């Protein structure tokens, strides 16, 4: 079964596509989306394409045409969908078509990718961001959305309970693992430079740890591994004591928040995307999936490659009141999001 043929997944798309937003602002607009086949990008594209009344056009950027063709088979011959093969780290985008919105979602986002491709991890967030910003500046786009991350806050050293958008955090920049958070920080700084020097309109959503049925099979984040175990009917393997306490977001909620930032966010501002109902310890998260799958949580040491990419943060909880005051509200609890993810992926045979 294809993902788009799954009833639960279609329900998720419909729920987000029918939220009480000013969707008419997007009518007849063209979106350029990097990281199109990724977890968040692919769901965003499904939502936009489902709103046929808006007549939006998608330019999906990616390095792998075969992968994109498989994921977007339903849209491949649609005149409102274009796949543009490019490596944003290395290539300037030579596309003369009018673009209204650029949404930059391309990035390595899991431990094994950080450990095995640290150069690609940091360059996607600096050089790739700069290439897209240059394109956006030269094509007079209406708005640029740079997807940042909870990782920019680094470690919580006990001075705050939750991260607000003005918290600076602590990151040891002299480690291989620092490439991701420092890259995101540099990407945000680049956005501010383009706002000042090129008079661009840019908004910066900062995403919590995100999960959902659009996750890639290569994803090595702990929550993704738990979900895979649950789908396969295996015990849930926890590779630490599980005391880490993080904010999480179901992919549908992450996308609804991105759209809210696009529509209502203020230029130059960052917005935390998280929901207090989905703040949870790694051990309790594993327990939800284990209970649902009828299995148990077991403990296992990670290999050195995987361990090298792990976050050192033990508590990373985001305050999302700024975005909620703008009108955003999460639609899924942690338990609902996790169980839906497992059920959807079971039907795909993953």
Image (tube, helix red, strand yellow):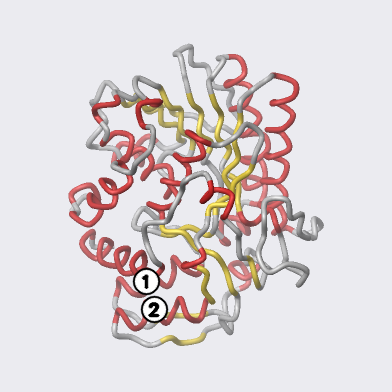
The image's mark for residue 87 is: none
- Tell me the distance, in whole angstroms, between the alpha carbons under discs 2 and 1: 7 Å
Identify which residue is drawn at 49% across, 29% down.
86
Q: 103 left or right of 178?
A: left
* Camera-side mark, 2 or 1: 1
Return the residue nearer the eye: 273 or 241. 273
Badge 1: residue crowd in 10 Å (few <14, some 14–19, many ≥20)? some
Residue assigned mark 2: 288
Task: Indicate the position of residue 223 as horizontal and vertical percent values.
Answer: 46, 68
Task: Indicate the position of residue 128 as horizontal and vertical percent values.
Answer: 61, 34
Residue 204 vertical placement versus 196 (above, below):
below
Q: Quadrant of residue 335?
A: bottom left
Q: Secondary structure at mark 1?
A: helix
Task: Indicate the position of residue 90 as horizontal and vertical percent values.
Answer: 61, 30
Identify which residue is drawn at 39% across, 78% down.
288
Which badge, 2 or 1, is on the more N-terminal residue? 2
Identify which residue is drawn at 53% across, 48% down.
325
Give the position of the C terminus as an image quadrant. Answer: bottom left
Q: Quadrant of residue 319?
A: bottom right
The reply to whether discs 2 and 1 touch (Cβ–Cβ < 8 Å) is: yes
> How many numbered discs, if any?
2
Return the residue nearer the eye: 260 or 204. 260
Task: Indicate the position of residue 296 as horizontal and vertical percent values.
Answer: 38, 88
Q: Secondary structure at mark 2?
A: helix
Residue assigned mark 1: 335
Q: 209 left or right of 137?
A: left
Return the residue nearer the eye: 340 or 221. 340
Give the position of the N terminus as an image quadrant. Answer: bottom left
Badge 2: residue crowd in 10 Å (few <14, some 14–19, many ≥20)? many
């Amino acid at each position: 079964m294809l993902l788009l043929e799954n009833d639960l997944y279609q329900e998720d798309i419909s729920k987000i596509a029918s939220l009480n937003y000013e969707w008419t602002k997007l009518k007849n607009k063209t979106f350029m989306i990097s990281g199109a086949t990724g977890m968040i990008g692919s769901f965003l594209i499904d939502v936009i394409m489902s709103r046929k009344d808006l007549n939006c056009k998608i330019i999906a950027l990616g390095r792998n045409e075969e992968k994109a063709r498989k994921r977007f088979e339903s849209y491949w011959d649609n005149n409102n969908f274009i796949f543009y093969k490019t490596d944003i780290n290395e290539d300037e985008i030579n596309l003369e078509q009018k673009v209204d919105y650029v949404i930059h979602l391309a990035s390595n986002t899991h431990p094994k990718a950080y450990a095995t491709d640290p150069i690609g991890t940091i360059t996607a967030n600096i050089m790739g961001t700069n290439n897209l910003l240059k394109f956006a500046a030269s094509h007079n786009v209406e708005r640029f959305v740079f997807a940042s991350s909870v990782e920019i806050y680094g470690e919580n050293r006990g001075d705050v309970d939750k991260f607000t958008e003005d918290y600076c955090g602590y990151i040891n920049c002299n480690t291989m693992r620092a490439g991701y958070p420092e890259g995101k920080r540099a990407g945000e700084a680049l956005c501010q430079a383009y706002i000042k020097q090129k008079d661009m309109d840019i908004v910066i959503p900062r995403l919590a740890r995100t999960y959902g049925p659009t996750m890639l099979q290569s994803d090595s984040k702990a929550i993704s591994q738990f979900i895979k175990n649950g789908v396969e009917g295996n015990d849930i393997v926890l590779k630490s004591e599980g005391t880490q306490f993080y904010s999480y977001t179901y992919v549908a909620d992450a996308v609804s928040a991105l759209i809210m930032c696009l529509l209502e966010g203020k230029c130059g501002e960052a917005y935390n995307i998280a929901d207090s109902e989905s703040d949870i310890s790694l051990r309790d998260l594993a327990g939800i999936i284990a209970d649902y799958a009828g299995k148990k949580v077991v403990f296992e040491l990670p290999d050195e490659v995987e361990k090298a990419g792990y976050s050192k943060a033990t508590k990373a909880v985001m305050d999302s009141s700024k975005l909620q005051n703008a009108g955003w509200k999460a639609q899924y609890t942690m338990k609902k999001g996790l169980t839906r993810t497992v059920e959807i992926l079971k039907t795909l045979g993953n």
